[in-house]
Image (cartoon, rainbow, N blue to C red):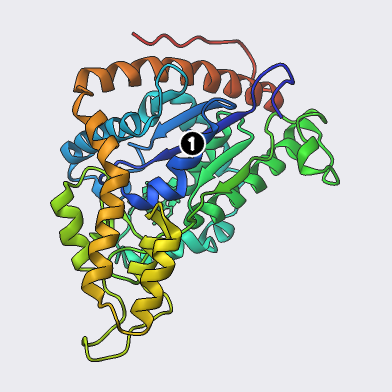
Amino acid sequence: MTASNEKPRLLTGDTPTGRLHLGHYAGSIENRLAMQDDYDCYFLIANVHALTTRSEEVAGIREDTIEIVRDWMACGIDPNRSALFLQSEVPAIAELTWYFAMILGYGRLMKNPTVKDEIRVKNLGDNYSFGFLMYPVGQIADILAFRPDVVPVGEDQVPHIEMTREIARRFDQLYCGVSGQTDDADYVKEGGVFPIPAAKTGRVARLTGIDGVNKMSKSLGNAILLSDTPKEVQKKCNKIFTGRGTMEDPPVMENNTVIEYLRSFHTDQSRVDELVDAYSKSELGDGHLKKEAAEAINTLLDPIRERREKITDADVVDALREGTKRANAVAEKTLWMAKQAMKYDFFERGLELR
Ligand code: ATP
Ligand code: MG
């Protein structure tokens, strides 16, 4: 835990491999908004990790960086309260990545189910870069650089947080003399540099994409974006795969993605009960449910759209500059604490951000 006179700390982030979608909203952003007042919040744009799959289109990474931060601010993430920052401009993260890579087993990394899933789902085959395997280690550094108490994430990220917790324990045991018998909650009290951070999944831990199968994902083309127009939302909802072969087939009630969206985003759940009941008896078809799902989603997105209109590129860059300064202050301190623990503290150094 952080010192008792301070707020507990929260860190999470998004990779600029596309725009934010409804999965991000229900999986993580809602939690961020709910916790923004009670936690000292750090929100990272993982622009270095975006290179794992986009090293040949850096212009797209830059554009998505701006758009994701604009989405954050449009959703209600407030740069005056929370630090919004760029991974590439916090050098302590890159340095910590090296130290953590040295105490993480290669075999352990390759057993991480999220790494295996990403290789499969994104069709990376054997063609992924060396850096792709570095990104989960880098993510450990993204998190631990802030010594956070909690990390709001979607379900797919939980294995990464588990690995982060293992590395925090290992570092504290190896270099800070913390006993392996210590309770997770007591690592810092026992002299550890790193707390053992907890993953916090959202109201919807894994939102399905409009393909009706995979996790809604920026890079799979199955996402409804927070920046989609009302028409685009309706069009995408019309494409949702509900598991039915033809309209003559009976409705599929299990794992039906339209029902999932109605459950996740409609503000009147008794109306959803009625719709689902009528649908199960074939009194209503897929088209009707899709239309109501699109309306519910547009109701959620309308105020976000309105706020987004007013946020300029300059507002975004100002927020990132200020947030990155605050992020560097914390991350540099963490790095110094880690170096002290490792007896690499020959002399202190400063970092100036212009
Ligand atoms: P990519 O396809 O590039 O991996 P992504 O859509 O998975 O993109 P990330 O930037 O990797 O998005 O994830 C940002 C955060 O949002 C993570 O905490 C992740 O767990 C969460 N998240 C992503 N997709 C979903 C989803 N469909 N449901 C719930 N949470 C999600
Ligand atoms: Mg992802």
- 34 vs 82: above or below: below
Q: Is residue 298 left or right of residue 152?
A: left
Q: Quadrant of the C terminus?
A: top left
Residue 127 sits in quarter:
bottom left
Query: Can residue 336 be seen from the camera position used here?
Result: yes
> Is 42 on the left-hand or right-hand side of 314?
right
Q: Residue at x 33, y 36 (%)?
A: 47
Residue at x-position 51% and y-position 15%: 329
Q: Is residue 126 visible?
A: no
Note whether 186 is above or below 262 in the view shown. Answer: above
Which amino acid type is shown beneath numbered disc 1?
A: Arg
Q: Which residue is mark 1?
A: 32
- Closest to the observer, 23 or 229: 229
Query: Residue 261 location, x and y as percent?
Result: 36, 61
Residue at 19% across / 47% down in the picture? 228
In the picture, which quadrant includes the N terminus? Answer: top right
